[in-house]
Amino acid sequence: MQNPSRSQWSLLKNPTGKYIFKSVTQAACEYHCPVAGIMERDDTNKVLDILQDPDYHTVVQIAPAVRVALGEEFGMEPGTIVTGKIYHALRILGFDKIFDTNFGADLTIMEEAAEFAECFIHEPEKLPLITTCCPSWINWCEKFYPAMIDNISSSKSPQQMLGTMVKTYYAEREKLDKSKIKMISIMPCVSKKVELHRHPDKLFSSLYVRKWYTDGYHNFPELEVTASNFCSINKFK
């Protein structure tokens, strides 16, 4: 499949011959717009309100890329691994439970592998099977290559997988009312917010975690990294 040019990413002709704008919501518009005509939505205040509401059980998931991206937002050397500091910071901010999106990715891989094996053996005409991990890719396929929608895996993305597990298995195991569980996702890409329309949880990018945390009185680079920070990360058993 040939990748579209820069102009094809944004302009298409509809059946009437008129050009229409289509975005794949990967934030290129925000970064390149010279007049700040489009900006990422900031959900900071909404999440702070949730954290301060004792009726809610607050859960946060962290995407793998965040652990090497967030430090740079606080003036640290680019690529610095700050996993332990993130866990410490999230505990200070008041989250009840912390999960790693890597677990959701494991579930997605398992489901997609099983789906691929089923197609390969019994329905090879449905191949290739295309992953659902990236919401920008799904958006792009739906808008630019709709004929390939049937080739997209039926599995949820890692973010959605973990969100679903928290609202079902985890809620049942911990005897929690799932309507009182609020899942916050910390992701490196704003296209993940598109999934809000398909999976109703709040979401931050690394940029807004920096704003959110520096509005307080804590120095992120100086946070201690202790064994307890890692031991407190919750896992499904």
Image (tube, grey):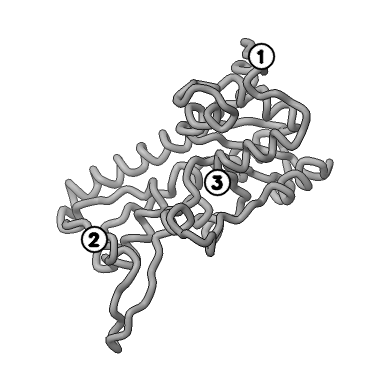
Q: CA distance from mark 1 to mark 2?
A: 47 Å
**Residue 44, position in %: x, y?**
69, 47
Identity of the residue drawn at 63% across and 24% down: 87
Reading the image, the residue beneath label 2 is: 5
CB-based contact (under 8 Å), mark 3 and mark 2: no
Residue 49 percent location from the top left of the image: 78, 47
Q: Is residue 115 left or right of residue 108?
A: left
Name the spot of residue 12 as percent of width and height, x first.
30, 74
Q: Nearer the viewer, mark 3 or mark 2?
A: 2
Q: Which mark is residue 224?
A: 1
Q: Amino acid at mark 3?
A: Thr
**As drawn, is 140 to the left or to the right of 83?**
left
Q: In this image, 212 relative to 80: left or right?
A: right
Report the Cα–Cα distance between label 3 and label 2. Answer: 36 Å
Which residue sits at x=82%, y=44%? Answer: 53
Furthest residue toward bottom: 16
Q: Earlier in the sequence, mark 1 or mark 2?
A: 2
Q: In which quadrant will I find the C terminus?
A: top right
Q: What x and y, as percent, mark residue 27?
A: 45, 54
Q: Secondary structure at mark 1?
A: loop
Q: Nearer the viewer, mark 1 or mark 2?
A: 2
- SS for dot 3: helix
Per the image, label 2 sits on a secondary structure element best described as: loop
Label 1: how many Cα within 10 Å (few below 14, some 14–19, many 20+): few
Q: Residue at x 26, y 65 (%)?
A: 145
Q: Give the alpha-carbon distance from disc 3 to disc 1, as whole Å.
A: 32 Å
Seen in the picture, residue 188 relative to 153 is either above or below; the reply is: above
| Residue under numbered circle 3 | 164
Q: Earlier in the sequence, mark 3 or mark 2?
A: 2
Which kind of residue does numbered mark 1 sit on? Glu
- At 74% from the left edge and 40% from the top edge, which residue is drawn? 57
